[in-house]
Each structure stands twice: as structure tokens, then as C-alpha cells.
Image (spheres, grey):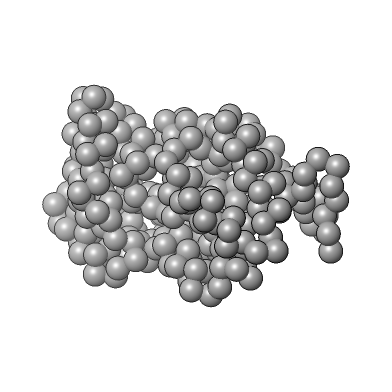
């Protein structure tokens, strides 16, 4: 029996996808960096009446990635799909973040995807499998105080869009999944905004406005289970698209970029996210 490998399954989209894929009949290998954080995953699987093969995989560690995929292929014979979901949230701006923070975000959110995808390709070629990455509308439209995160997601989009025809020639289907706001503890991992505001210096007023706007956006966020359903549908689609948005709102938002040749529509919109009512952006 072939396996579906999913990274970052301790919570949120990864957890929901592992359960939904197992419920759809897939043999799911649910991976996470720290196996001691698997309680929620095990509880959800038990409640759904499904069995998961839970394993350690740290997307920032070459040996961890290759060892896990080698063991999975050895046990199941074929890897039918690899779903790159592991990621880390981050808020900040370039001047106050510094290069170390930028590297940390890229290491998990971009190089982690590249590392897993590289190691997976020989197995996916052999089985004519699927390679998916959970990206974001932030991989299409850059957003204030998300320079590092959006840079990583832009890079994932460029990586997979470029890889798509090459992988297809080898029988491997490549897809990007682009959610908007999702109600999960992903954003909770951003940490204490009080400390963040104190450290933001001249950007404090802008960050306060952004945080207020973001709280409103996440009040109407999509459920992780809804995103998981889209991913499971992609696994069953004989001709999956390169790019799929997981909600009508995400599709509308991403569509702004596709029709915005000079960038003015995007930046006119996102500048309103960091100004209080009646204020104008400063130069």
C-alpha cells in the first residue's frame, strides 16, 4: 500500500489534513518535528476512527528528512504523495527584524519545503505521485509586516511553478494550495504582541493598525478542516491544477495580483491595513 506523507501535523491544517486523508482511505504518514506534541493528533485520529503512522521529521534537518522518507518507502513500497505543510508564522519588518530572523523564517518555510521536495522526488517519480505545498495568499500578495514570511511563500510559489512542467514530464503532479486566514494556533505562535509593539520603534503605530485589522480578518477565518478537504480533493483529481485557492475570499484576493501589472492595486489595498481611519500613509 502506498503512503501519503504530510509534514507539520501537530495542529491546524496539517492535523486536519492527516485525519481527512486517512478518512478518505489513504495510508497517512503524519510527521512532526517533535513527537511529544502529537497528543492532539492522536486524539483527533481516535475520534475520527482512523489510524495514522506518526513519525518524526524535522524539515530543517537533512538527515531527518532523508531517513524518514527512506523508511516510509521501505515499509510501504511507494510514496503516493508528499504534502509540505510544516511552517512557522512570523510578524515583523525588515529594519527591526534583522538578517537572522529572515534566515530563520526562510529556513523553515522555504528551505524546509525545498529540502523535503528534493528528497521526495525519486520516490514520487517511481510511483508517478503527487507533490503539494501549503502556500498562502501571502505567496501571491506581499503583506505589511510579513516581509520574511511572504518572501518565503513567494519563493515556494516560484519553486513549484518552475518545477511543475519538469515534474509533469516525469509523471509527478505538482500543486500549490493557497489559503487565506485560517483559524488555527499557527497565528498564536507569533507570541506576545505587547513585546512586539515595544520593539517596533518608529513602526509602532503602523503595527498597531495592522494587528487590529488582522484580528478582524481572523474573526471570519476559514476552518483548517475546510482547507484539508481541498487538499484531499487534489489528491483524487486526475489532472490537479498547479494553484488552487481554498475559499472564494482567497481567490478574490489572489486575483487582484494577477490583473495588477504595475503593482498599484495591491499596494493601494495593503497600505490601508496599516493606517487608522482618516490617516494617510507617510513617506
The residue sitting at 26% across, 36% down in the picture is 40
| Location of residue 261 with respect to 188 vertically, above or below | below
The residue sitting at 34% across, 66% down in the picture is 60
Measured as percent of width and height from the top left, residue 4 is found at 29, 45
**Residue 193 in view, yes or no:** yes
Front one among 241 and 264 = 264
Query: Does 11 sit left or right of 72 as displayed?
Result: right
The residue sitting at 45% across, 44% down in the picture is 188
Look at the image and tell me in which quarter the C terminus lies.
Answer: bottom right
Measured as percent of width and height from the top left, residue 124 is found at 33, 56
**Residue 22 in view, yes or no:** no
Measured as percent of width and height from the top left, residue 17 is found at 36, 37
Look at the image and tell me in which quarter the N terminus lies.
Answer: top left
| Location of residue 27 with respect to 166 vertically, above or below | above
Front one among 244 and 240 = 244
Q: To which quarter of the image does residue 155 belong?
A: bottom right
Measured as percent of width and height from the top left, residue 122 is found at 31, 63
Front one among 279 and 229 = 279
Amino acid at each position: 500500500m502506498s503512503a501519503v506523507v504530510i509534514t507539520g501535523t501537530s495542529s491546524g491544517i496539517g492535523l486536519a489534513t492527516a485525519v481527512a486523508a486517512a478518512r478518505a482511505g489513504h495510508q497517512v504518514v503524519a510527521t512532526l518535528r517533535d513527537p511529544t506534541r502529537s497528543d492532539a493528533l492522536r486524539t483527533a485520529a481516535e475520534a475520527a476512527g482512523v489510524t495514522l503512522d506518526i513519525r518524526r521529521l524535522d524539515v530543517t534537518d537533512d538527515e531527518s528528512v532523508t531517513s524518514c522518507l527512506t523508511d516510509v518507502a521501505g515499509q510501504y513500497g511507494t510514496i503516493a504523495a508528499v504534502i509540505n505543510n510544516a511552517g512557522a508564522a512570523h510578524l515583523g519588518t525588515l529594519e527591526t527584524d534583522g538578517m537572522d530572523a529572515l534566515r530563520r523564517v526562510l529556513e523553515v518555510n522555504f528551505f524546509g519545503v525545498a529540502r523535503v521536495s528534493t528528497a521526495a522526488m525519486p520516490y514520487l517519480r517511481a510511483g508517478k505521485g503527487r507533490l503539494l505545498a501549503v502556500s498562502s495568499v501571502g505567496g501571491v500578495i506581499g503583506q505589511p509586516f510579513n516581509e520574511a514570511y511572504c518572501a518565503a511563500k513567494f519563493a515556494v510559489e516560484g519553486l513549484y511553478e518552475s518545477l511543475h512542467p519538469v515534474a509533469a514530464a516525469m509523471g509527478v503532479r505538482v500543486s500549490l494550495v493557497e489559503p487565506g486566514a485560517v483559524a488555527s494556533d499557527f497565528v498564536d505562535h507569533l507570541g506576545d504582541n505587547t513585546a512586539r509593539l515595544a520593539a517596533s520603534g518608529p513602526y509602532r503605530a503602523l503595527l498597531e493598525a495592522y494587528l487590529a485589522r488582522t484580528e478582524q480578518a481572523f474573526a471570519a477565518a476559514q476552518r483548517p478542516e475546510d482547507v484539508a478537504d481541498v487538499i484531499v480533493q487534489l489528491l483524487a483529481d486526475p489532472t490537479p491544477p498547479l494553484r488552487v485557492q481554498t475559499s472564494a475570499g482567497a481567490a478574490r484576493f489572489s486575483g487582484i495580483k494577477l490583473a495588477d501589472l504595475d503593482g498599484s492595486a495591491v499596494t493601494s489595498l495593503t497600505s490601508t491595513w496599516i493606517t487608522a481611519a482618516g490617516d494617510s500613509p507617510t513617506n
